[in-house]
Image: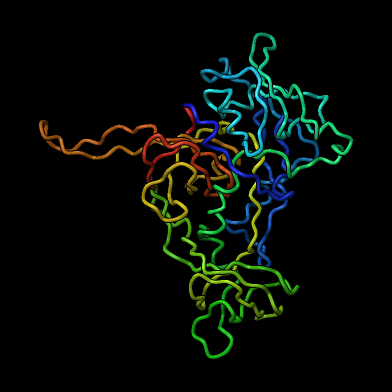
């Protein structure tokens, strides 16, 4: 597989909290963990926007787990010996510049201990391909002048490159979410609209039950519970499609609390749920293969389209309970079509075909969100995802 280094350029619009994750150490397949997550103010139960605490607790002292592959990592055709990191690069861009399969980056990343924050990469850094004991390694041979300046002791996290472009996962926040079955009923809900209104829109106030915070100004997203979402493998109900209604601010706490709607794309109705508006997405992690075998399906795509292409966000029916974590890379296999055998009779299912690559950026107990990094063929809901070959 090869990727265009320029096609994955994207502007860096990242918060310091989002970038608090440091890149992993020398040749490691590290456990994924995130910075502090926004949690619903109303309940101790988690939702699909709030990962379980056990999945994202950063260790007190990070020790990478070295897991070398037996064969040399294949390099990309025409790879450079040096590369200057550019503004707008992502780690996936850079990995694809050097490697045939970008998810093997942890196997060859070689930390330079003389550089402040050697796990992070910044625009202006010079990465070099070197050979140590006969094996290819990528190392930061020269840090940018900005990072080497005296002010660099305060790490400029907002300047560090991300693993995937923020702009391409923004749809995760703006186009609806998946609400897991067990937690949907525990979220705060719209009880009534203030005044003589059956429905509410921007400029109206609503009464909400289940909000425990009482600080005015706290922001929430209003989500309508949409169609049920079933696991195609066992027909088990795993959640609901969440349809974005709008945003609001807490005006007064209590039970019920008062929320003022500030922006809506459709009418808010009794029964709609409220979620914390801002959810951090970890963007600094190493792409890598999952630590255990995975065989799952794509169950939904953010945006509701029928054919899935590059940089679209998909939802899969496998999560932390199946050994997945942030940064894991999966190969998508297009499900073979069932065709009539005009000569031998009956029907035949055509074989699966490799269709693309997905990298996980948000993982929960039973589902995961991933960004399609490459689509060599059209990808569809119910296509299979497995470990890279």
For the point 74% across and 32% down, the residue is 119
The extreme right residue here reads: 150
Horizontal placement of 144 versus 337: left or right? Answer: right
Residue situated in front as seen by the camera: 158 or 46: 158
Residue 245 vertical placement versus 142 (above, below)? below
Picture coordinates of residue 223, whole percent (x, y): 53, 67
Snapshot quadrant of residue 26: top right
Picture coordinates of residue 177, whole percent (x, y): 52, 58
Residue situated in front as seen by the camera: 268 or 264: 264
Picture coordinates of residue 172, whole percent (x, y): 54, 54
For the point 44% across and 38% down, the residue is 385
The extreme top residue here reads: 134
Horizontal placement of 385 versus 93: left or right? Answer: left
Picture coordinates of residue 375, whole percent (x, y): 43, 37
Residue 161 vertical placement versus 204 (above, below)? above
For the point 44% across and 51% down, the residue is 301
Horizontal placement of 159 versus 245: left or right? Answer: right
Horizontal placement of 320 versus 374: left or right? Answer: right
Residue situated in front as seen by the camera: 67 or 158: 158
Snapshot quadrant of residue 303: bottom left
């Amino acid at each position: 597989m090869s990727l265009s280094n320029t096609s994955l350029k994207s502007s860096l619009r990242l918060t310091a909290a989002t970038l608090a994750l440091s890149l992993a150490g020398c040749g490691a397949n590290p456990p994924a963990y995130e910075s502090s997550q926004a949690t619903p103010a109303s309940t101790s139960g988690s939702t699909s926007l709030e990962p379980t605490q056990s999945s994202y607790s950063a260790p007190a002292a990070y020790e990478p787990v070295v897991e070398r592959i037996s064969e040399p990592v294949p390099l990309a055709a025409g790879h450079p010996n040096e590369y200057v990191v550019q503004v707008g690069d992502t780690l996936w861009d850079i990995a694809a510049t050097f490697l045939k399969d970008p998810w093997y980056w942890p196997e060859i990343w070689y930390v330079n201990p003389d550089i402040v924050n050697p796990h992070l990469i910044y625009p202006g850094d010079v990465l070099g391909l070197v050979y140590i004991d006969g094996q290819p390694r990528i190392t930061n041979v020269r840090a940018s002048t900005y990072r080497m300046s005296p002010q660099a002791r305060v790490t400029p996290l907002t300047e560090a490159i991300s693993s995937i472009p923020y702009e391409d996962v923004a749809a995760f926040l703006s186009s609806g979410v998946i609400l897991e079955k067990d937690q949907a009923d525990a979220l705060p809900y719209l009880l009534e609209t203030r005044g003589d209104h059956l429905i509410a829109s921007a400029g109206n106030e609503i009464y909400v039950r289940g909000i425990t915070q009482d600080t005015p100004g706290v922001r929430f997203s209003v989500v309508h519970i949409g169609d049920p979402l079933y696991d195609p493998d066992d027909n088990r109900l795993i959640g609901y499609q969440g349809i974005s209604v709008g945003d609001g601010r807490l005006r007064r706490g209590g039970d019920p609390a008062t929320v003022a709607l500030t922006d809506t794309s459709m009418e808010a109705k009794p029964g709609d749920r409220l979620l914390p508006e801002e959810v951090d997405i970890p963007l600094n992690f190493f792409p890598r293969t999952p630590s255990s075998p995975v065989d799952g399906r794509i169950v939904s795509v953010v945006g509701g389209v029928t054919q899935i292409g590059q940089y679209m966000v998909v939802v899969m029916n496998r999560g932390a309970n199946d050994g997945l974590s942030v940064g894991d890379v999966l190969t998508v296999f297009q499900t073979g079509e069932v065709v009539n055998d005009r000569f031998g009779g009956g029907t035949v299912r055509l074989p699966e075909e490799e269709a693309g690559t997905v990298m996980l950026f948000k993982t929960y107990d039973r589902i995961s969100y991933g960004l399609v990094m490459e689509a060599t063929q059209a990808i569809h809901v119910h296509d299979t995802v497995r470990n890279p070959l």
